[in-house]
């Protein structure tokens, strides 16, 4: 089998590492480098296991412009980035590029949109893709050619999630994920969903009706509380679905590019990461 393309949700990896590792991990000047170290280790774990043909780390807007315009409360409750992470965030692209990894960013779309766009481009070219993320919204990308590597707390490596695993976890298909998010809501994104409809009811509705539009059209046949939510929130739920659906960015399929372990080791040394530098050289 040809080697897969590894796509990385860079913001998710940086935040995960920042809060998982102690800020006592510093460079020679006392600056915390825990997010840099942890995010690189997460990607290297996948590189060592899957031997990807290339690695692309995606950054983007904190909240896509069109999503904020559609629903101003989207991401509104998220706290500001900690100062110690902000310092590392600015240096992350250079560190990743020193390892031979590509870094791509977008001013108006989010990292998730870029991840989905690169996966589509790889699939169109006949390749396979791995998406490293902690965001279950990316389950909508799962297919025969795309596997989501879902990061979980307190375990060494991510879970492999394909279409079968999406059905096992939520009881729906990957294509139904935006409809599911619209109905159930997504607190991390500030989307409340339909009042009184949780994950179980959302999955049941989609299993029986197929998509959000048919769920709304058939609302009259549901129990009173569900019927009321679907009818009164119909327009809002359609907006939530649109927000949860990934947008396609104009991206080019990445060229094959090996991890530069020597370049990465030199960069690691500059951040005081002696153990990582030695591991890369070995």
Image (cartoon, helix red, strand yellow):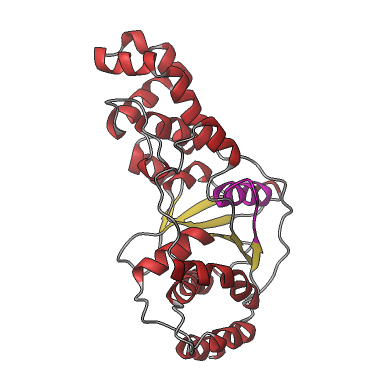
Considering depth in this image, is 150 or 264 the residue closer to the camera?
264
Q: Residue at x 40, y 19 (%)?
A: 233
Q: Quadrant of residue 127?
A: bottom right
Residue 135, compared with residue 22, is above or below; it is: above
In the rendered image, is residue 5 in sight?
no
Q: How many marks?
A: 0
The span shown in magenta is 104-122
In the rendered image, is residue 207 in sight?
yes
In this picture, residue 148 sits left or right of residue 21: right
Q: Whole-percent x and y of residue 265?
A: 57, 86
Q: Quadrant of the N terminus?
A: bottom right
Q: Is residue 201 magenta?
A: no
Q: Residue at x 34, y 43 (%)?
A: 169
Q: Whole-percent x and y of residue 280?
A: 54, 86
Considering depth in this image, is 248 or 54 the residue closer to the camera?
248
Residue 123, compared with residue 30, is above or below; it is: above
Q: Residue at x 43, y 18 (%)?
A: 234
Q: Whole-percent x and y of residue 107?
A: 65, 50
Considering depth in this image, is 89 or 51 the residue closer to the camera?
89
In this picture, residue 141 sits left or right of residue 151: right
Give the prevailing secondary structure in the magenta stretch. Answer: helix
Q: Whole-percent x and y of residue 75?
A: 45, 44
């Amino acid at each position: 089998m040809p080697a897969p393309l590894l796509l990385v949700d860079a913001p998710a990896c940086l935040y995960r590492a920042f809060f998982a590792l102690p800020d006592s991990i510093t460079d020679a000047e006392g600056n915390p480098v825990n997010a840099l170290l942890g995010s690189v280790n997460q990607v290297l774990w996948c590189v060592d296991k899957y031997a990807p043909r290339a690695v692309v780390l995606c950054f983007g807007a904190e909240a896509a412009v069109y999503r904020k315009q559609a629903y101003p409360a989207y991401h509104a409750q998220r706290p500001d980035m900690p100062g110690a992470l902000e310092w590392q965030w600015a240096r992350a692209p250079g560190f990743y590029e020193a390892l031979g990894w590509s870094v791509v960013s977008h001013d108006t779309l989010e990292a998730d949109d870029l991840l989905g766009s690169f996966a589509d481009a790889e699939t169109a070219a006949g390749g396979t893709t791995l998406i490293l993320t902690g965001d279950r919204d990316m389950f909508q990308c799962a297919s025969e050619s795309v596997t989501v590597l879902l990061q979980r707390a307190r375990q060494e490596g991510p879970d492999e999630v394909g279409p079968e695993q999406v059905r096992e976890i939520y009881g729906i298909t990957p294509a139904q994920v935006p409809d599911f998010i619209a109905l159930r809501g997504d607190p991390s994104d500030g989307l409340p969903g339909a009042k009184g409809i949780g994950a179980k009811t959302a999955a049941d509705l989609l299993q029986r009706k197929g998509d959000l539009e048919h769920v709304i059209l058939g609302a009259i046949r549901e129990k009173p509380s569900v019927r009321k939510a679907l009818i009164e929130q119909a327009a809002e739920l359609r907006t939530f679905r649109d927000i949860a659906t990934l947008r396609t960015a104009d991206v080019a399929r990445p060229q094959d590019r090996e991890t530069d372990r020597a370049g990465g080791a030199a960069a690691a040394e500059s951040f005081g990461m002696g153990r990582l530098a030695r591991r890369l050289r070995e």
